[in-house]
Structures are given as C-alpha cells and as structure tokens.
Image (cartoon, rainbow, N blue to C red):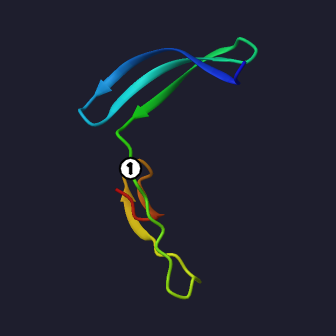
Amino acid sequence: MTRFEVVGSTTVADVGFLALAEAQVRGREGESFTRFVVHHPGAVVVVPVTADHESVIMVRQFRAATGGDLLEVPAG
C-alpha cells in the first residue's frame, strides 16, 4: 500500500484556470484527514545562470499570501 491515498475530493471553488478542492486522504494505518489542493494547468520555471556559472538570477516579487516580497526564479 502507498503511504497515502486520496479517497474523495470536493471542488470548493473554481475560477476557470484555477480550482480549489477539499480532499479526503487515508493514511497507511487507516487514519483519515483533510487537505486542500490547488489544481492549475501547470507552469514552467527557468533558472538563469550567469556566464561564469557563479550566480543565478532571481526576481523579487510581492506575494499577498505571505504579505511580503519573496525571492523567486522567473516562472510563468
């Protein structure tokens, strides 16, 4: 048996390209719990490296979820 198994899922919100689901999960020993899962179509990320291979380039981006800026690799 795998560690965890999703045994049910209900869509809580759907805004077109993004959906939030409430999943019911069962653990290896039969315990059950709930997790919220964001479904999205996917994204890509690049890690730009300088010509000397000594540094990577990151962007500083405000993220409302954290209430502040994060350093991130460029993605889309």
Q: Residue, x 50% and y 86% (percent of image)?
A: 51
Q: Residue, x 41% and y 68% (percent of image)?
A: 60
x and y, in percent, of residue 34 in the image: 55, 20
x and y, in percent, of residue 49 in the image: 50, 77
Element on which disc 1 rests: loop
Q: Residue, x 25% and y 32% (percent of image)?
A: 15
48 lies left or right of 12: right
Question: Which residue is label 1 attached to?
Answer: 43
25 lies left or right of 45: right
Dot 1 crowding, Cα within 10 Å, few <14, some 14–19, many 20+: few
x and y, in percent, of residue 74 in the image: 40, 64
47 lies left or right of 43: right
Quadrant position of the N terminus in the picture: top right
Label total for image: 1
The correct choice, above or below, for 62 with respect to 25 in the image is: below
Quarter of the image for residue 42 reads top left
x and y, in percent, of residue 16 in the image: 23, 33
66 vs 19, nearest the viewer = 19
Quadrant position of the C terminus in the picture: bottom left
The correct choice, above or below, for 14 with respect to 51 in the image is: above
Q: Residue furthest bottom?
A: 52
What amino acid type should be assigned to the residue bearing mark 1? Ala
61 vs 58, nearest the viewer = 58
4 lies left or right of 58: right
